[in-house]
Every structure is written in C-alpha cells, then in structure tokens.
Amino acid sequence: MNESLLIWGIGLIALAGFVLAAEILIPSGGVLAVTSAVFAISGIVCLFRYDTTWGLLGSLAVMVVGPMLGAFMLKVWPHTPIGRRLINGTESDEDRENRRIAEERERTGRLALVGLTGVATTDLRPVGSAEIGGKRTEVLAEAGWIRAGTPVRVTVVDGSVIKVRQA
C-alpha cells in the first residue's frame, strides 16, 4: 500500500487542528475554521484511500477531538488579547479614565444650567430645542406646549434630560 496517503492523511488532520486552534488567535471571520474543515475532510479521504480502518479511526478522531478542541477554544478565547479586546472593547485604562472625566464635566455642565433662562428656538411639544447660555440644547417642557421665541427657565436636569418651563 501507498504509505504516503497515510502520512498525508494524519498530517492533514493534525494541520486542521492547528489551523482551528489559530482561529482563536487570528480574527479571520471563520475563514480559518472553514480551511480547517477542508483539511480535516481531505485528511479523512486520504486515510480512507489508504485503508478503511484508518479512515474510520480518522473520522472518529475528527468527530471526537474536533468538538472538544472547539469547546476548549471557547473556554480559552475570552482570556486571549483579541478575545478581551472584542469582549471588553479596545479602551485602555487611560482612555476609560479620560472618558469618565469628560462625562463628569459634561454632567456638571448640565447641572449648572438649572436656574438659567433662555429662549425656545422651536416649538416645545413637549420636546424641542432652546438656546440657553448661548448654546442650542434639546429640552423638555415640563407642562404643556411652549411656542418658539418664548422665554424659558431651566428647572430640572435629570441625567441628559433638561426640563424647562415658561419664564
């Protein structure tokens, strides 16, 4: 019998395992997984062409070890640098801290609007926009409908919602 088919079959199945393992380290969108499947099927075909017993053993190995390797990869993937980046985002600690500081400044700036007066630039039914402190801002009328051009006073800032009433 042709020993090279046996060597090719075992080699292709082993290569399929390595390529599948590389899938967790290299984001390929599934290309490596499909390539791994092609290698595994080609290896099984080579083993069947060598001998039916080897073909069945190769098939059994792929059907048992393949899912085990896949499950192991899913367990390990969140702990890889790429997995962490995809799950947690690409922000570094410094970026996260800068974003937190910017959000705190923005929240403080919105809270400083309480008590200021401005002019409704659009009809508030009840949502619209008003110019407050020289800046156009989306606001919510507390009660009823306020026509454009009417003076308004900021009464409450709740998160990103700025509530106004007619001044």
Image (cartoon, rainbow, N blue to C red):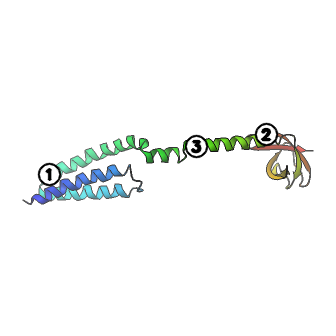
Say left or right for 142 vs 35. Answer: right
Which mark is nearer the camera, 1 or 2?
A: 2
Which mark is nearer the camera, 1 or 3?
A: 3
Which mark is nearer the camera, 3 or 2?
A: 3
Q: Quadrant of residue 101?
A: top right
Disc 1 is placed on an element classified as helix
Q: Position of residue 59 (x, y in %)?
A: 21, 50
Residue furthest to the left = 1
For label 1, the crowd category at 10 Å Cα-Cα, with few meaning under 14, some 14 to 19 and many 20 or more, is some
Can you tell which mark lies on residue 94?
Answer: 3
**Amino acid found under the numbered disc labelled 1:** Trp
Say left or right for 83 vs 122. Answer: left
Residue situated in front as seen by the camera: 143 or 35: 35
Q: Quadrant of residue 11?
A: bottom left
Picture residue at 28% right of the left edge, 50% below the top: 17
The reply to whether the C-beta atoms of the residues labelled 1 and 2 are less than 8 Å apart is no
Can you tell which mark lies on residue 111?
Answer: 2
Picture residue at 91% right of the left edge, 55% below the top: 149
